[in-house]
Image (cartoon, grey):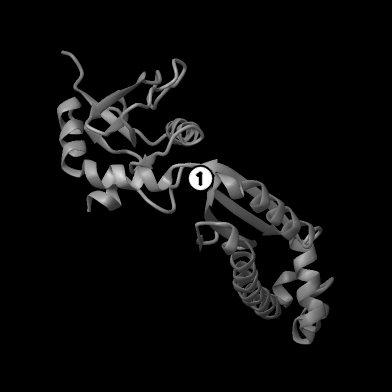
């Protein structure tokens, strides 16, 4: 008995976009990426088994690589990961129902990309800074230093709470400074939730290609000012995951 097949939808693009011959999709083996067109817009899709579980790290990587690679050459509206429909007719119906909104959003995204700025504190440098700024924390650190954990449990818990609170306050301040610095160089910017308790900054920006060089230079300056305290990472250009999606436009 043949397995039932469906179409995994990656993103919405202008109708003249063609996937590269080496584009590969989700699944094992990876599906061939094709296009379903309807009017001014199209959808990047690939066949998948309706019985297969899609959620492996390799699937998410394939999804992001396809969308990010597309964003480098054409505007793209990401479709939520894991969206599978029954076939080309269902895709065409989606594009027909929301094509005008999709086309308008794609026009606005022309020449714009997402960048993610992520910084994580160097733990030892962070703790040293907290102890220097907070006499109570420094006193607790003296009390637990060199003594067994079972004898200093309460002090260690309190010290951990003080450090955690300090990280939260510093993170809020750092994110505000980052957004204030990069906001004028971006179309839009927003703070993202921390991905780790030691996160210093985590924010996404929609950047016009004419401002990319100035934006990257500003990020490098921000990172240089925190060298030794924060490990900075800049990801991009990416598809605009944090700013618009086909699901939002389709309601």
Front-most of 116 and 167? 116
Element type where label 1 sits in the image:
strand
Whether residue 92 is visible, yes or no, is: yes
Whether residue 152 is situated above or below residue 186 in the rendered picture: below
Instruction: Tell how many labels.
Output: 1
Front-most of 188 and 193? 188
Q: Residue at x 64, y 70 (%)?
A: 177
Front-most of 55 and 60? 60
Q: At which x and y percent is residue 10?
A: 35, 34
Q: Is residue 232 left or right of residue 19?
A: right
Q: Residue 164 is drawn in which quadrant?
A: bottom right
Q: Is residue 205 left or right of residue 122?
A: left
- In the current view of this chain or complex, which residue is farthest to the top? 1
Whether residue 10 is situated above or below residue 240 in the rendered picture: above
Q: Residue at x 27, y 51 (%)?
A: 249
Q: Residue 94 is drawn in which quadrant?
A: top left
- Residue assigned mark 1: 113
Whether residue 148 is situated above or below residue 187 in the rendered picture: below
Q: At which x and y percent is residue 91?
A: 21, 32
Q: At which x and y percent is residue 80?
A: 33, 43
Q: Residue at x 80, y 64 (%)?
A: 125
Whether residue 205 is situated above or below residue 36 in the rendered picture: below
Q: Residue 221 is drawn in which quadrant?
A: bottom right
Q: Is residue 194 left or right of residue 234?
A: left
């Amino acid at each position: 008995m043949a397995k039932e097949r469906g179409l995994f939808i990656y993103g919405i693009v202008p109708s003249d976009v063609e996937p590269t011959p080496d584009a590969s999709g989700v699944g094992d083996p990876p599906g061939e990426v094709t296009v379903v067109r309807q009017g001014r817009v199209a959808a990047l899709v690939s066949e998948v088994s309706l019985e297969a579980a899609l959620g492996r790290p390799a699937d998410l990587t394939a999804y992001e690589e396809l969308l990010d690679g597309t964003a480098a050459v054409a505007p793209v509206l990401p479709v939520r990961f894991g969206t599978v429909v029954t076939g080309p007719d269902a895709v065409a119906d989606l594009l027909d129902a929301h094509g005008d909104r999709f086309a308008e959003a794609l026009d606005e995204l022309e020449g714009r990309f997402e960048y993610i700025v992520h910084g994580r504190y160097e733990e030892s440098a962070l703790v040293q800074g907290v102890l220097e700024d907070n006499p109570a924390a420094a006193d607790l650190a003296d009390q637990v230093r060199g003594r067994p954990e079972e004898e200093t449990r309460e002090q260690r818990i309190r010290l951990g709470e003080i450090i955690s609170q300090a990280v939260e306050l510093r993170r809020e301040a750092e994110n505000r400074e980052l957004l204030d610095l990069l906001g004028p160089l971006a179309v839009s910017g927003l703070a993202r939730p921390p991905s780790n308790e030691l996160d210093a900054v985590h924010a996404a920006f929609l950047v016009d290609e004419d401002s990319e060089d100035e934006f990257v230079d500003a990020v490098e300056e921000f990172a240089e000012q925190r060298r030794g305290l924060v490990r900075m990472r800049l990801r991009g250009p990416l598809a605009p995951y944090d700013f618009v999606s086909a699901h939002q436009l389709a309601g």
